[in-house]
Image (spheres, grey):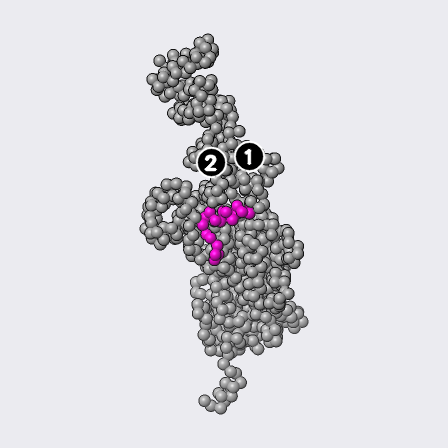
Amino acid sequence: MSDSLADAAMAHPPRTHEDYQIGVICALATEKAAMVAMLDETYPKLKKENGDENEYTLGRIGVHNVVIACLPAGLMGNGPAAIVANNMRRSFPIKFGLMVGVGGGVWSKKDDIRLGDVVVSQPTGAHGGVVQWDFGKTGKGGKFQRTGSLDKPPPVLLHALQELRTFDLTDGVDIVGSLSFMVRNKPRMGRTYRYQGEDHDQLFEATYDHEGDETCDECDPKLIVQRPAREDSTPRIHYGNIASGNEVMKHGTTRDKIAKEEGVVCFEMEAAGLIDNFRCLMIRGICDYADSHKNKIWQPYAAATAAAFARALLGFIDEQEVIKTPLPLKPLRVLPFGRNKDFVGRQSQLDRLINILYTEDTQEDCQRVALVGLGGVGKTQIALECAFRLQKILPVLSVFWVRASDTTSFDNAFREIGQQLKIPGLEDDKADVKILVKTKLSQESTGKWLMIMDNADDFEIFYHNDNKDSGSGALSEYLPFSPLGAILYTTRDREAATRYAGSNVIDIDEMDDEESRKLLERSLQNKQLIEDKDGTIKLLKLLVNLPLAIMQVAAYLNAKSSTIAEYLRIYEESSDNVIKLLGKDFEDIRRYPGMKNPVATTWLISFEQIRIRDPLAADYMAFISCIKGQDIPLDLLPLASKFDKTEALGTLKAFGFIKERLSGISYDMHRLVHTAMQNWLKLKDDLRNWNQKALQQINDIFPWPKHENRAVWMKYLPHTETIITSIDLLGGVELPPMLLLKLAECYRIAGNYSKAELLGRQTLQLKEKVLGKEHPDTLGIIMGVASSLCQQGKFVEAEVLHQQTLQLKEKVLGKEHPDTLASMMGLASSL
């Protein structure tokens, strides 16, 4: 090595990744070529991080080292731009960047934008410099409302921009000088990257669409907007909001409408993908007017003027300012689980979550949203999937998970978050960890974050503190607040959800048929089991498409190498087997360590909360588990004041244990909730007691059946049948004869004479035992049974009973008694 080369090597030691802290991103090769031509020096490539597919050009402009990347060939828009930016940040410690390229200008009398001019994104009005024009929602009257808010450029760039503007007013920014530098540096570019002439700068009326091929030769020149000629061809610089979208804007009327609504002066396709993830300034050379009269002849020159401005801007940034600028905080991911590879469906709920937490986030408030639904319905998994999807959309977003089922878990989660955030003083014995974490996350300098409050079922610990001596307040006092933050709750309690999130409450119900089938298929080791289509449909119907139940069944099938048909047989044999099968633990790494995962367990956790909060609601749960779980009449429930009953039903609805029917006077209980509650009563040896209470309540309220009150007793009938069946199975409890008699009459009126006969005979046995065979009530029942036999055509049997009744009535009441005469008429009808 010569002495001169050795001296050069000593003066300029090899550059490392740490030397490149300013990034430049271009969308097109035309744009990157212009930016590369502005480099004072180029430097050797450096090794990239694994997974970084970008291609980089490294070099120097003035005192600043810069790294330049371009989107892959053929790919444009916000998504690819975000990927390139994220990869660049992985390989280099980028503090801020520039997006340099071409765009479509919006001419107006206020902003006399011409082709070849430069537009720079500067916060204007309500926007931070970039507006995503195609991102929003359809509001009232079908009007499209752009939603969300994009970050403004970092202070170091805004300060430099202000200095440049000041200098431009006094001395003028030498864009032409930078263009000349480009040609001297890369002479070949002088032929293509040149000014195209005023004659080729044509702006047509907004309502006039392009005619002909690529050029405007066939367009009507009479519809060209007449603008005053400029004194020279020097590019002018314009500042304001830039509209970004995933589609090219090429419609004059739409362009002007959006420009007027949002105050934008330029349209392009990449900025919105960068601004929230890559702290940068947008620089656009104007190559067309964002209408249908597009052609590419101005693209090279527009790319060159944008690159020339970027070179000029870097000259206004002091090297020390770059050194002092902190690196963006690396996003944290404090989650208890990895991503669920078996997650399926729930697209509508996820879309709404993304809308609330990202699309509609104006960064003017700390967004709050709650997922509410039954235990095991999949709230935690939806929240987890949302966290991963949001971090893909917003790579700068940190995600924190808090298990909020009790104060101890809450405290532990906050301590872990504090450790990840490296908060000073956290390990001090006297430190209030929750306050330290709240303070840190409430500072905008912490950046964007999402906190997930999982299992926030007990709002008492959030909003009330019964232990004042503990030195710890209600948990709500420790929730951070930042316009850059958001909190997502999962809860079984609708009342709590509303308290947490106001109107941002999302109901999570069972999956639809297709989603549940996909979940079962993904969860099964033996995928061939799903080929039993009829069995699969039947099984999922029994499981009411509930994700946790489906996962339990899949775990059972996997562990036992069983078939769906075998599982269905066990399921249907008895409710005891249902409970046994659905109560088994199964291995699922996404559940909490040490926490049981059976369907029954998740619901019983909720039930324990209800027992503490509202004993009447707990009693209603026990009562309902003894009767049929569907169409439960409000007036069938045990007596209570109107206020207490309303409160109790509100609690059960809030926890998702019952659903109110559209009629508003009856309720349904989830089938598996019903089974789980029966299991709980058995475990507490309280099932017989509650069956007797339910039986007594129905006996007291059930009216004597008539045609006139048919609507009433028809509502009670299925519940009465259920409780009688349960009592029979338990044994040892005598059924009320009058209730059996009422049931028999119900069946008789309904035309179900065989059941009427069966209930009549059962009642007769009880009456004979208690009152004796000759008691008038007993004789009346015998006549009822005989009548049912006649209705079935069993006249011989009916005749025997009528003769028996007639003989007893003549003996007890006499031949002339009206009841005796009625028996004579019954006997005659059976002959």
Q: What element carries label 2?
A: loop
Q: Is mark 1 on a helix, strand or loop?
A: loop
Q: Hey, which quadrant is residue 324 in on the image?
A: bottom right
Question: Which residue is under mark 1?
Answer: 638
The residue positioned farthest toward the right in the image shown: 170
Which residue appears at 40% of the width and 47% of the height? 581
- Frontmost of labels 1 and 2 is 1
Q: Give the range drawn in magenta.
A: 592-610
When the figure is inspected, residue 402 is found, relative to residue 233, above or below; the finding is above
Q: Identify which residue, 365 or 792, lies in the foreground.
A: 792
Q: Identify which residue, 635 or 711, lies in the foreground.
A: 635
| Type of amino acid at the residue the image marks with label 1 | Pro
Disc 2 packing (10 Å; few <14; some 14–19; many ≥20): many
Q: Hey, which quadrant is residue 825 in on the image?
A: top left
The secondary structure that dominates the magenta segment is: helix
Which residue appears at 50% of the width and 47% of the height? 604
Residue 205 placement (x, y as % from top left): 55, 54
Which residue appears at 55% of the width and 34% of the height? 638
The residue positioned farthest toward the top in the image shown: 816
Q: Using the rendered image of the protein, determine whether residue 160 is visible from the camera's viewpoint.
A: yes
769 drawn magenta:
no
Residue 78 placement (x, y as % from top left): 50, 60
Question: Which residue is under mark 2?
Answer: 628
When the figure is inspected, residue 161 is found, relative to residue 576, above or below; the finding is below
Q: Identify which residue, 138 or 656, lies in the foreground.
A: 656
Q: Quadrant of the N terminus?
A: bottom left
Inter-mark Cα distance, 1 to 2: 15 Å
Q: Quadrant of the C terminus?
A: top left
Residue 713 placement (x, y as % from top left): 49, 27
Which residue appears at 59% of the width and 40% of the height? 647
Q: Identify which residue, 509 or 593, lies in the foreground.
A: 593
**Callout 1–callout 2 Cβ contact below 8 Å:** no
